[in-house]
Image (tube, rainbow, N blue to C red):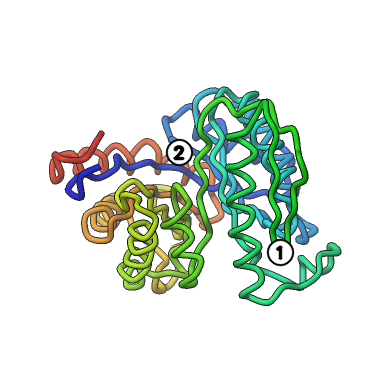
Amino acid sequence: MSENKRLAPLFGANIDPSAAERDEPFRRAQIADQNGLHLITIQDHPYNMRFFDTWTLLTTLAMKTERVHVGTNVLSIPLRPPAMLAKMAATLDILCDGRLELGIGAGAYWPGIEAFGVEKRSPGEAVTAFEEALHILRGMWENAGGSFSYDGEFYRVKGARPGPAPAHRIRIWTGAYGDRMLDLTGRYADGILVSSPYLPPRGLARSNRLIDEGAQKAGRDPSEIRRGYNLMGVLDLDGADTPLREEKEGVFYGPVEHWVEEIVHLYQEYRQDTFIFWPNAGNEPLQIEAFAREVVPAAMQKIRELDGKAKL
């Protein structure tokens, strides 16, 4: 892909895995599916007693939707052995007709992870284990129908017989902030998913540079790696009870026009091309519907007008 080319923007919404209202995740997924969003994603914090298990919930949402892609944002690799995760992902991808997106991370909250019986890893060990997981996931999928082995420091696969193969080439997204994780993203992953409060726009240039350098070392085209941004904030809706809060760096507040401007700016100036809306206003279903119906079409139109080179 030419450096002048950009990937067409994708838009999605977060589905909170809260168990407080059993049917609420399905309601939000249906809104996304029926209003043309490209993907829905779910965070993975199984040690939170108020949350459903992410993979189980993702599977049920996939069976209740038809078009929208479903993904993890991001799955904790220390709690999900990669060889088994490859089997799980391939199975779900087949069952949902090739709509799975797999976001994975090295582990963010170690007290919770340790409480589930996983031995704590140092930051360096966690990244090494994560790299091994990347190789195992692809190795299992690419050798479906044959045999696969891997001998790493943290993970070993001994003549596994992987299969069935996924319905499509599953994109792997990383939850990456540190230098080594960003380098791994550039070398091996298909995309990155970061959250705006933890990596405000001013930090995106550095993140992009490290991803690009990793890709170049691996002989990859950096422009083929998706840059996903979890947009957290409040969409101010006319006539709706939408409590606006004091604006903080990396958290977005404002009417439709403001969100459109921010997205276009992120796309044009910071190379972000995948936008996941994380509403936190207390009226999330209404927020998601307005994002899909009002923000996304307007942002797409403006991007088309400003960037005729985008592969839309």
Q: Quadrant of the C terminus?
A: top left
Q: How many marks?
A: 2
Choose between 136 and 191: the one closer to the eye.
Answer: 136
Q: Residues within 10 Å of mark 2 (few under 14, many from 20)?
A: many
> Which residue does the numbered mark 2 point to in the structure image?
289
Residue 114's place in the image compared with 43, above or below, is: below
Circles 1 and 2: CB atoms closer than 8 Å: no
Residue at 81% in and 69% down: 119
Q: Residues within 10 Å of mark 1 (few under 14, many from 20)?
A: few
Residue 93's place in the image compared with 210, above or below, is: above
Mark 1 vs mark 2, foreground winner is 1
Residue at 50% in and 31% down: 68
Q: Is residue 261 left or right of residue 61?
A: left
Q: Where is residue 97, by image quadrant? A: top right
Q: Is residue 46 left or right of residue 246?
A: right
> Which residue does the numbered mark 1 point to in the structure image?
153
Q: Secondary structure at mark 2?
A: helix
Q: Is residue 70 left or right of residue 261?
A: right
**Amino acid carrying mark 2 in the image:** Glu
Residue at 77% in and 68% down: 112
Q: Secondary structure at mark 1?
A: loop
Q: Quadrant of the N terminus?
A: top left
**Amino acid carrying mark 1 in the image:** Glu
Q: Where is residue 27, by image quadrant? A: top right
- The mark found on residue 161 in the picture is none
**Image location of residue 267, percent across then percent down:** 27, 53
Q: Is residue 239 left or right of residue 92?
A: left
**Image location of residue 155, percent across then percent down:** 73, 56
Mark 1–mark 2 Cα distance, whole angstroms, equals 46 Å
**Image location of residue 188, percent across then percent down:** 47, 52
